[in-house]
Amino acid sequence: MTEATTSATYTDAFSFDTGINGSHLVKAIVEINPNTSEPEVGIEFNAEGTKLFEKATTQYLNKRIAIFLDNAPIMAPNVKNIITDGKATISGGFDTKQAKTLAAQLNAGALPLSISLVHQTKVGASLGQDSINKGVFAGIVGLIIVCLFMIGNYGYLGFIADIGLIIYGLITLSLYRLIPVTLTFPGIVGFILSVGMAVDSNILIFERMREEIRAGKPFNIAMELGFGKAWDSIKDANACTIITGLILFNPLGWNFLNTSGMVRGFAITLILGIIIGIFTGVVVTRNLLRVLAKKQNQL
């Protein structure tokens, strides 16, 4: 509890406690001295505080009494008179802002208020878990639809791409456990989005391969040319996405960038997914297609 006290303890110059604390203060207000027109702070004590203050001003007449807030000294006014009515003014060449600040500090210290429970609401863990379960279900459904689309549009090439996607998923989830990554709902969204980026890489490669095959190239040459020509587009698109993810993640903690934990969770899963998607799309799928090309040549 914040409490103002007047004490004869101020660095090394004071060593006695007057016994006055914030509970004895009735109010502190800003007043204007009619003679000097300077702002002052008027203070008023209750009955018990009046007695203690009279004793303190008698004992420390022409000396300084320190005022503490949260055990830190805020000022030490000089006692010019013995004060018996519990009302005093603190002056010292204040401007209006300084006087208001001191009055606010004294009033804040005069609030010996207890904390009581007014309202309590409990949110069960099932609410968040339900969101996670729905997100995982949506991700599985989306992955299945993507796999069916790849097979329907590209045949056996799509099936190989689906194998790459399954490997992608296994590597990604393994890294989530190793790092570790807390899989929140925004994180699941980042994972699903990165799946789409991984499929996009395969689509670019396969379309390039189709162009080369239509040009009369054999499968193994069309495959190598397809990967080579698609790489520039894959590299540029994914590099831009990774840079965006880094800005959202804000690894250096810059205040002018995002600091939200939810957005950072989305960004980290997106960045990991993009990097792993490049690996599976270009390395894993490529090697699987090379194995397929070798089998075709043997036949």
Image: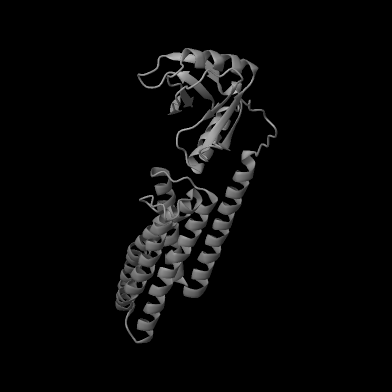
Comparing 127 with 38, the one in front is 38
Q: Quadrant of the rendered structure where residue 24 is? A: top right
Total labels: the figure holds: 0
Comparing 198 with 91, the one in front is 91
Figure check: 249 above or below 113 = below
In the rendered image, is residue 227 in sight? no
Comparing 38 with 41, the one in front is 38
x%, y% of residue 68? 47, 25
Residue at x-position 53% and y-position 17%: 82
Viewport quadrant of the N terminus: top right
Viewport quadrant of the C terminus: bottom left
Going by the picture, which residue comes out furthest to the bottom? 215
x%, y% of residue 147? 51, 65
In the rendered image, is residue 216 in sight? yes
x%, y% of residue 179? 38, 44
Position of 8 with respect to 130 (left or right) is: left
Q: Colour scheme of this structure image? A: one colour
Residue at x-position 53% and y-position 39%: 100
Position of 218 with respect to 30 (left or right) is: left
Q: Quadrant of the rendered structure where residue 296 is? A: bottom left
Comparing 31 with 68, the one in front is 31
Going by the picture, which residue comes out furthest to the front? 35
Q: Quadrant of the rendered structure where residue 77 is? A: top left
